[in-house]
Structures are given as structure tokens and as C-alpha cells.
Image: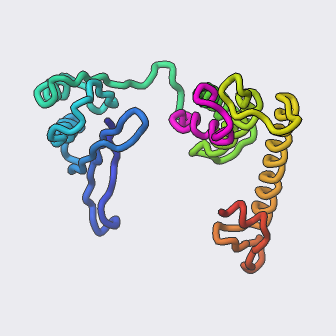
Amino acid sequence: MNRTFSRAGSYPTFKRLAWRHILVDTVCLLLHAKVLPADIQDRDGGVLLLSTLFGLYPFLVKLFADAGYQGPKFATAVAKVLPHLSVEIVKRSDHASGFVVLPMRCIAGPATITPASGYVGPLGAATIGACGGVFCCLVAGWVKEQIRIDDSLDVFGVHGLGGMLGSLLLAAFALPALGGSGYGHSMTVARQLSAQVLGVVAAAVWSALCLCDCESAGCDRRGTCHPRGGAQRPRNDLACRVMNA
């Protein structure tokens, strides 16, 4: 459970401030939400949110809430509304320094298995997904710092790196002994791995060329370029359209 701050209307004509209290599951899917005036304390707003579930989600047994909901008043009120629900307050680590965006682990697995979909069995898919989650979590932040890209949603760190890993692991987990669909005529694990590496390198080179072309031309999402010191001109080449798709 978390809360976010919002402002209704256009400032300074309106000054209605509100808190949005939201309840999500472990994969960040919305379960319930409630918008309340900002003068209501967090703990009171959280109780109002839980008290309006009206019997929904009876399977909930554990509630993780941020530090805004800590205190005996909130715990006592939740115990009265939902006696079977235990509450744990998630606090900031004492070793944390600054703000670091964590990779989206919930989609790293599906992003990694996507290139191998249809060619590996259930065991291979689960293994590749688990490897993708660990790999993206450990490597995504480091790569973003090294190449200095603005990727707050970890598109490259999760989809790009995870997709590369899944493409390479396909060569091993496509074996029929592991539940895979097997290889084509005269293909072996080594040959398939070489083909996968070639595909990954080709995709990376093409993406880099498209990025450099659009960045140098200053193209926007509509395919219009805004060169420094010049007038707008339409941009219809394939590279720019691919980058802005």
C-alpha cells in the first residue's frame, strides 16, 4: 500500500490538494484505490482504503505499507477492519544513500524468454526467465551508468539486455532432451549459438546506427527533424521511423 500526491485543477486558480491511496499486489497490479483530501492523515486514509474493500480479496493475509502508515493507531484500526491481515511497515535501509531506480524484476523474466518462445519447453522457459531476472537486476544499473543513457524505465536494461540473454540461451535450451523443439537441418548447439550471436550483434549495430542517425538529426516522434539553426523538415528514412515507432 502506498500513497501519492496530486493537485486537482490548474494552479493557481484551484488549490485542492489530495492524496491517492492505492493497494496493489506483488506484481504492482492495482487492487483498490481511494482519493482523499490532503488534510487526512496517512494512517486514517489507509484505514479508509481498507475499510472500503467490502469483502474483496479475502485471500489477502499480508500487507506491506510504507513508513507513512506506521504507528499503533493504524495497526489497531486495521486489526478491527481486517482481523486476519498482518501489517509490515517497509522502511528505508540504514545503508541506503541517495535514490536509485531498481530494475523492473517483474517483467525481466518475460522479456528474457520472449526470443525463445515456441522453441523451448516449460523447464527451459522457467530457467531462462529466472536467469533473466537475476541478470537484469545485477547488470542493468551498471550498464546504464557506464554508457550514460537516460533510461528511467530500464527499457534497454531489461528488454534489451534480457532479450540478448534469452536469444543466446535459446541455443542451449532448444535441445529436445531439455524439452525444446530441436534444431534445423545440419544445425548443432555450436552452430545455433553462432547464429544467435550473429543476430544479437546485427540487431545491436542496427539499433546503434538508428540512434546515432536520429540523435544527430534531432528527430521527434512524428519523424520531423529539428536541426540546429535550421527549419523543420520531414524525415522519412527507415532508420528514423524505426526509432520513433
Instruction: Assign the N terminus to one quadrant of the image.
Output: top left
Which residue is at 51% across, 24% downward?
Answer: 96
Q: Viewed as shown, does residue 65 lie left or right of 117?
A: left
Is residue 226 found inside the magenta-colored segment of the image?
no
Residue 183: x %, y % from top left: 79, 35
Which residue is at 25% across, 59% downward?
Answer: 16
Q: Viewed as shown, does residue 206 lie left or right of 77?
A: right
Who is closer to the viewer here, 218 or 174? Answer: 174
Residue 10: x %, y % from top left: 34, 67
Which residue is at 27% across, 44% downward?
Answer: 32
Who is closer to the viewer here, 232 or 169? Answer: 169
Is residue 183 visible in this depiction of the protein? Answer: yes
Q: Residue pushed farthest left?
A: 80
Q: From what the image shows, is residue 82 above or below residue 9?
A: above
Q: Viewed as shown, does residue 111 lie left or right of 210?
A: left
Where residue 115 sits, quadrant-wise, is: top right
Secondary structure character of the magenta stretch overall: helix
The image's colouring method is rainbow
Where residue 21 sits, quadrant-wise, is: top left
Is residue 100 visible in this depiction of the protein? Answer: no
Instruction: Give the extent of the magenta segment.
Output: 100-124
Instruction: Assign the C terminus to one quadrant of the image.
Output: bottom right
Residue 234: x %, y % from top left: 73, 78
Who is closer to the viewer here, 119 or 148? Answer: 119
Q: Residue pushed farthest top?
A: 94
Is residue 113 found inside the magenta-colored segment of the image?
yes
Which residue is at 75% across, 41% downward?
Answer: 147
Residue 160: x %, y % from top left: 69, 42
Where residue 223 sits, quadrant-wise, is: bottom right
Report the number of numbered marks: 0
Q: Viewed as shown, does residue 206 lie left or right of 122?
A: right
